């Protein structure tokens, strides 16, 4: 629990103000006040602009599966270093990012998944197999990859 509190504080007071001003406005993912609705607004805006000059407009909608689990620590820390110049704050952020390398993280994921599978197995529901398959598809962190989960409140 204390890890989550520290993560939220660092995110709110260090990362958001340090990095957000450098992002393009169309980057709506995981940003306060943004999200799918804002993304759709941008798509409509640009489609309408393109339709003025082109008969056909193509849009690629995609989602990178398990994206946050695959982010390379070394690469993300290079980017973070550009915006966080205080060595103590940088080391704090680095520790948070590298926390996914701790064995207890994957062990906790496995424990929660197994507990939830057992709970679902005891239920009388139609899509039980799908729910269990979905749980089993939750990835584990690889060393040097992934960002800790940051749920918005």
Image (tube, grey):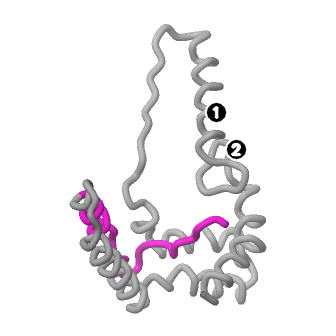
Residue 45 percent across, percent down from the top left: 65, 25
Q: Is residue 106 above or below residue 34?
A: below
Q: Residue at x 29, y 68 (%)?
A: 123
The part of the image, by quadrant, that contains residue 39 is top right
Q: Which residue is at 33% across, 70% downward?
A: 139
Q: Which numbered disc flags the more N-terminal residue, 1 or 2?
A: 2
Q: Position of residue 78 (x, y in %)?
A: 56, 71
Report whether 109 appears left or right of 47: left
- Under circle 1, the secondary element is helix
Q: Position of residue 143 (x, y in %)?
A: 37, 82
Q: CA distance from mark 1 to mark 2?
A: 9 Å
Q: Which residue is mark 1?
A: 42
Q: Which residues are magenta?
A: 130-153
Please indicate whether residue 54 sits to the left or right of residue 124 in the image.
right
Residue 25 bears which disc, if any? 2
Do the residues bearing badges 1 and 2 touch, measured as CB atoms within 8 Å? yes
Question: Pointer 1: residues within 10 angstroms few (<14), some, or many (20+)?
Answer: some
Q: Residue at x 52, y 72 (%)?
A: 149
Closer to the camera, 120 or 49? 120
Say if the magenta span includes residue 137: yes
In the picture, which quadrant includes the N terminus? bottom right
Place residue 71 in its image quadrant. Answer: bottom left
136 relative position to 141: left or right: left
- The quadrant in which the C terminus is found is bottom right
Query: Which residue sits at x=58%, y=10%?
Result: 53
- Count of number-bearing discs: 2
- Dividing the picture into quadrants, the one containing residue 66 is bottom left
Q: Please tell me whether mark 2 sits on a helix, a strand or a loop.
A: loop
Pick the front one: 120 or 153 = 120
- Name the chief secondary structure element in magenta: loop
Task: Indicate whether residue 7 is drawn in magenta.
Answer: no
Q: Residue furthest left?
A: 129
């Amino acid at each position: 629990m204390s890890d989550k509190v520290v993560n939220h504080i660092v995110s709110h007071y260090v990362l958001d103000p340090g990095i957000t001003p450098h992002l393009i406005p169309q980057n709506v993912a995981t940003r306060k006040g943004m999200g799918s609705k804002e993304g759709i607004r941008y798509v409509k805006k640009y489609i309408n602009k393109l339709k003025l000059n082109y008969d056909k407009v193509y849009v690629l909608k995609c989602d990178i599966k398990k994206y946050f689990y695959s982010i390379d620590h070394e690469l993300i820390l290079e980017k973070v270093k550009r915006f966080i110049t205080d060595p103590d704050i940088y080391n704090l952020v680095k520790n948070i990012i590298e926390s996914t390398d701790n064995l207890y993280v994957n062990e906790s994921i496995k424990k929660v998944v197994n507990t939830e599978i057992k709970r679902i197995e005891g239920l009388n529901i139609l899509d039980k197999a799908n729910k269990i398959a979905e749980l089993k598809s939750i990835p584990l962190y690889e060393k040097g990859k992934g960002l800790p989960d940051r749920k918005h409140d």
